[in-house]
Amino acid sequence: MRHRRMGESGLAVSALALGTMVFGEDSPRSTPPADAEQIIGRFLEAGGTHIDTANVYAGGRSEEIIGNVLGKRRSEVILATKVRGRTGDGPNDAGLSRHHVIREVHNSLRRLQTDWIDLLYMHQWDPATPISETLAAFDHLVRSGTVHYVGLSNFAAWQVMKTVGLAEISGFSRPVAAQYQYSLVTRDIEFEYLPLFEAEGLGLMPWGPLGGGFLSGKYRPGERPATGRIATQPDRDEEAWERRSNERNWAIVDAVGSAAADLGVASSQIAIAWLLTRPAVASVILGVRTLEQLEDNLAAIDLELPADLIESLNTASEPPAPYPYRMNRIYGNRVIE
């Protein structure tokens, strides 16, 4: 397993991270606790050191499963979790207020059976709480040793910059990680976020590297699946069939399949290996449900994509540039003397 630095921090994380969102979920597409424990053990055996979860995954059961497995191996792992989502029916049972953040971090520590969290994400922007209050709460947790690093997820670009800027001028612990959806079929963040993360030193943690399984090579146009994640997602959700099944995305699937055939590997490995070539990426989150899927995804770490193949994937998946990006591609890089 290869390791990379998380942004401009000194933290090293495995280039592949284990995502645990479906561990313990009460649904047909979930991973039962016994299987989840086996997956975590295999990930650690393969040299993986970065495990990602959230306090709201499976109502906290994902954190409990991880805590049960790690035990004495806790110090071998960079453990990331998140706070912001609703955990109860009360008015203070959601958000990024000092009250909710500190209370839920202690609940996560209990479920994870640990004294510290290596990386704590603000799971989404909270319009009801001043970001200064949230940063102060996170900074308190860092200074106390309860949290080691700060991250953010699903923020708009201006929200990322406001958070980073305020942290710097206030002397608060600065975010070093950013978690966003990113794959060959979802490249929206390239217009604003990738240059922002590079400029501000945030390590990118892409989730959904296979587009909800769409890039696995098992789907065909006009054949809507009856099972699997894509089949069970509501049409409004990010990884839903209605969002994935379009002409552009099927062309991307063809390009990935062609590359996989040329190299004699699985389509999923091509998709993950492509992400590992992208700017600012620190660690790609594997959203596996079974041990078989984990074994397949792990093989991507040893896959070196030829430059011409990377270019063909870039071309096939390049999203149309909206204004002002299409204009800036023509005029924006000119140096005015």
Image (tube, helix red, strand yellow):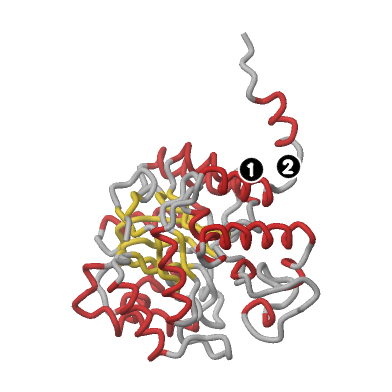
Q: In the rendered view of the protein, which quadrant contains the N terminus?
A: bottom left
Local secondary structure at mark 2 = loop
Q: In the rendered view of the protein, which quadrant contains the C terminus?
A: top right
Quarter of the image for residue 283 reads bottom left
The residue nearer to you, when weighing 187 against 172, is: 187
List x then y, in percent, for residue 105.
37, 71
Quarter of the image for residue 335 reads top right
Residue 125 visible in rendering: no
Local secondary structure at mark 1 = loop
Which residue, given by chain and number where applicable, does mark 2 sit on? 321
**From the viewer's perspective, is 333 left or right of 64?**
right
Quarter of the image for residue 80 reads bottom left
Which is nearer the N-term, disc 1 or disc 2?
Answer: 1
Q: Is residue 55 above or below residue 207?
A: below
Which residue, given by chain and number where applicable, does mark 1 sit on? 191
**From the viewer's perspective, is 112 left or right of 195?**
left
Marks 1 and 2 close (CB-CB < 8 Å): yes
Name the residue type under label 2: Ala
Residue at 43 percent across and 57 percent down: it is 303
List x then y, in percent, for residue 212.
61, 70
Q: Is residue 163 above or below residue 273?
A: above
